[in-house]
Every structure is written in structure tokens, then in C-alpha cells.
Image (spheres, grey):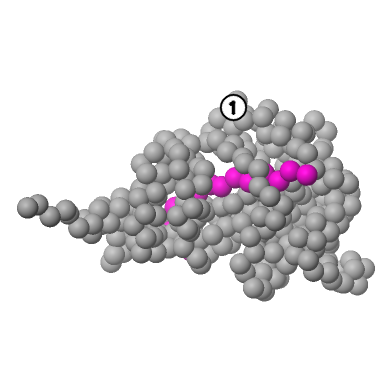
Amino acid sequence: MPIPSASRLSDPPWGAPPGFAIGLRRIAAGDWLEGGEARPWARKDRLFRAVPDKVWGETDGSRPGQAEVAGLVARALDLPLGLPLDRSGRPPLLDAARRVPDDLVLMERRGDDWAVAALSLSAGSFFTADEALGRDLATLHRPVPGFADRFLVRVRRIFERLPADEILERRNWSVTAWRGLYAPEAAAARRRALARRPRRPGAGLFLRCERQTLRRLPRTGGILFTIRIHVTPLLALAADPESVQVFARAWAAAPEDFRRYKGLAAVTPGVEAFLADRRAAVPKPSQT
């Protein structure tokens, strides 16, 4: 996996205290999909064969929105979408998701709220497709501290008012002992972190950076939510002192509710040891 660049690490919420904030910014249409994975279908197809309900789901009536998503992805990649649905047998959103590294989540209006109508989720951060399918915004974000009181109304307003010609982006981060993109269970990652006996400070820990985008489907009116995960060994940051400093500031500024929600207690000893080791490795200025 690529080491996050200094510019990526400096993007919100890296550069500021990484508490819970919406942190959306507008991006150009050409910056919507990052690419960077030659054969995403190989990784995703293996998961679909092994655990289909964990990585894919759709609700009745979501196919028109799925088809619109597939068209957006095909145009963004400047590629033909491929075989039509009646020949390939794949739902349109699943077909589109196989072509990009990102996970794709279709949100549609259901009653008084927005809910997950269909999703391809091969790299969810400790949740799975069967846990998310059909859930509305309030239910999906119930574990997030303060979401209902501080953010739910604002997020609903964004979903309602987002223009079709605007794309929004946000990023977040965590540290985990889980190496893979597919990370279905937080408890397993915590157990792995607690069982570690590393020879080097920070070994076996991984920086999990998440890039999300939102855009309106102009024809069917839904919202397409994309999720791109980058997993980088914490030790890889040691090659770039500036990245270490940016991460150290974000780590120190993380509030307690953020740490609890992300389950950072299990990785804190390893992260602190890594940062102490990096501080010790910085040459002290000579005194004359």
C-alpha cells in the first residue's frame, strides 16, 4: 500500500484535532475516483464468493438507482460498462464496484430519512453489508458519539440539498492491528493488538485512512457514497519525518470520545512506543 503523502496527511481531519466533524469539502469531478488498483475485481470477487452477504446487498426497487451509479462510474473511467445486466447476471452497482477500488453505497429516500438501498462493501471499517443494508442515517451512525444531537439534522440537510453538479469529499483515520482492507470485526482487531509482542516499536500496527465522497444522482435523486481505504504500516511513516510529525500532532489532539469510538486503547502502547522511538531517532542539535 502507498505511504500517505504529506498533502494527504495534512487534509482535514489530519491537520486539526480529529474529533467528530462532518469536514466536507467540494472537489472537482475529475478528482472523484482516485484509481490506483489495477484489478479491483480480483480482490472483490474473492470476497463475494466467500462471504457474499457480508460484502453485497440490495433492496427491492433500487435497480434504477444502481443503473445510474453504473453509468456515472463508466463515464468517469471512460470505459464501456460491459455486458448488459441480462447477460452478465450482476446487479448494476455490483458490476460498477468491481471496476473501482472504492466501495459504493447507494442511499435513497425511505420515508422520513435516507437509507442504504444497495451497497458493495469489500473494505468496510468494522461493519459489513448485512449490518448496513436498509439502515437509515440515524441508525447507521448511532455508535458515533454525539451524532444524533450534533450532526444528524445537518447531514440530512446536506443529503436533501446537495446539487447534482457538486461532489463532496471527507477523510478520516484510525490505527489498528488489522492489516487487510476487509475488516469485518473490530473485536478481532483489538484482540490482535492486545496479543502483540513486537520486536520493534509500532510493528504490527497500521494506519487506516478513509476517503469518502458524496454525490447526487441527477436522474433518480439518490446519493452515491463512496469509500476508499488506504492501509499503511505505521513503521512506513518512519521514512518521512514530516509525516511522523503530522501524525503525532493528530494523535496527541485526538479527544477521548474519538479514542473510545475508534477502539484506540488497544493500540495506544504501540503507538506511543513508536512515537517515542521516532523522537529518540531525531538528531539533537550540536552545541558549540
Question: Which residue in the rendered view is the most extreme toward the top?
Answer: 149
Out of 52 and 258, give the one closest to the viewer: 258
Q: Is residue 56 left or right of residue 4?
A: right
Q: Is residue 148 left or right of residue 99?
A: left
Q: Residue, x 66% and y 55% (percent of image)? A: 31
Categorize mark 1 by other alpha carbons within 10 Å: few (<14), some (14-19), many (20+): few
Q: Residue, x 50% and y 61% (percent of image)? A: 231
Q: Position of residue 160 (x, y in %)?
A: 77, 34
Q: On screen, 90 above or below 57?
A: below
Question: Which residue in the rendered view is the most extreme toward the right?
Answer: 86
Q: Secondary structure at mark 1?
A: helix
Does residue 87 appear in the picture of this structure? yes
Residue 221: quarter of image = top right
Magenta residues, start to end = 165-179
Does residue 197 appear in the picture of this structure? no
Write down the residue under mark 1. 150
Q: Is residue 188 magenta?
A: no
Residue 153: quarter of image = top right
Question: Which residue in the rendered view is the most extreme toward the left?
Answer: 288
Q: Position of residue 33 (x, y in %)?
A: 67, 58
Q: Is residue 259 left or right of residue 216?
A: left
Main secondary structure found in the magenta portion: strand
Q: Position of residue 149 (x, y in %)?
A: 60, 25
Q: On screen, 169 above or below 277?
A: above
Out of 133 and 75, give the one closest to the viewer: 75
Amino acid carrying label 1: it is: Arg
Q: On screen, 149 above or below 163?
A: above
Q: Is residue 43 left or right of residue 246?
A: right
